[in-house]
Amino acid sequence: MSSEFGIVIHGGAGTILRMSLTAELEAQYRERLQASLAAGYEILEKGGGGLDAVCAAVNVMENSPLFNAGKGAVFTHEGHNEQDASVMDGRTLECGGVASVKRIKNPVDLARLVMEKSEHVLLCGEGAEAFATKYNIDLVDADYFYTDMRWNQLQKALEKEKHLKTDYSQLDHTPDDKHGTVGAVALDKEGNLAAATSSGGMTNKRFSRIGDSPIIGAGNYANNSTCAVSTTGHGEFFMRCLTAYDVSAMMEYKQMTLTEAAEIAIVEKLTRLGGTGGLIAIDRQGDIALPFNTPGMYRGYRLANDEPAVAIFKE
Ligand code: ASP
């Protein structure tokens, strides 16, 4: 499936069953996935950079209440939204991330600023927001992130926790809660690879829990000599497996193809540890992989001079 350039996106992996999505909601998801692909593809087609393409694609999903990132971020135990995001440039291996930011409309843009304007890789919380104001990134009121759906999910999780009598953080890919983290990977016409990931994390998370999405090597990785990867799923397992980097390392050190490396990372390694989720990846030849070990993953891709394709369920 080699291609001169292309983009792959995900909108979260989980227990996404045909019977649990109404036709109307399914249509809404497909429409937003198409819009995200179109935003990224248009940039690549015009000769724009992979980094611009992945950020544009992620912004579309961050601005939609359907996905657990930006506008649709899930609530913490205390009723806030704390978001994580990262980007990586495969040409230079430069990268940036933000964790636990509460008032950033598009966390992926701030992650990119961290990469481009600071000497650091990862900033968190109020410090990251102070950095944002230095660069005129608008802070939104916390109310911007309120949606009834996410609030109700938190109430359900809190109720469940009472009965369990133990901490209960709900992943966004459990049966009643199937809207996930977003990500994009791209190969541009110059042969540069880039990756971006953005997430609200887990419903009812507490103690400033940070997931894999802002962690380079776990939730995100790009290297022009191998591939670009963005992950979604139970972050703690992706951090233990360093899944995104592992795909690149298997290609680099064992000369595996992207398909082989991506399958091993999810179907063997992540699954063996008990982790659930998936990843999207593209390599320097424009080959792509989208493995997941859950019933569904919101996903899509568009390769040079080809039609866009989106899918939700395991088909
Ligand atoms: N990986 C994210 C986290 O653990 C959640 C997700 O991808 O759905 O924070």
Image (spheres, rainbow, N blue to C red):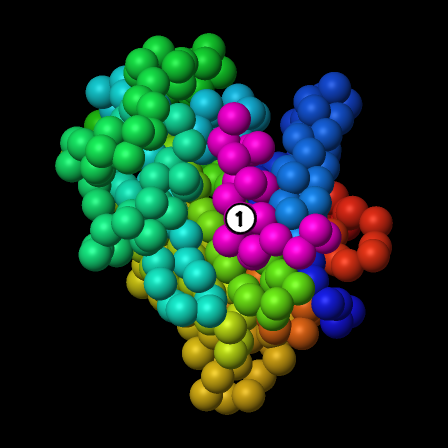
- Residue in the picture at 44% in, 19% down: 150
Q: Amino acid at mark 1?
A: Asp
Residue 64 sits in which quadrant? top right
Give the quarter of the figure containing the N terminus. bottom right
Q: Main secondary structure of the magenta part?
A: helix
Left or right: 249 as drawn, with respect to 28: left
Residue 17: x %, y % from top left: 66, 36
Q: Residue 200 location in percent, x, y?
A: 38, 34
* Residue 52 lies in the magenta stretch: yes
Quadrant hosting residue 159:
top left
Q: Report whether 148 appears left or right of 186.
A: left
Residue 108 is situated, as x and y percent measured from the top left of the image, at 41, 41
Residue 187 position in % (x across, y down): 61, 62
Q: Which residue is denoted by mark 1 in the rendering?
A: 52
Q: Residue 192: which quarter of the image?
A: bottom right
Residues rendered magenta in the picture:
45-63
Q: Residue at x 31, y 14 (%)?
A: 141
Q: Residues within 10 Å of mark 1 (few under 14, many from 20)?
A: some
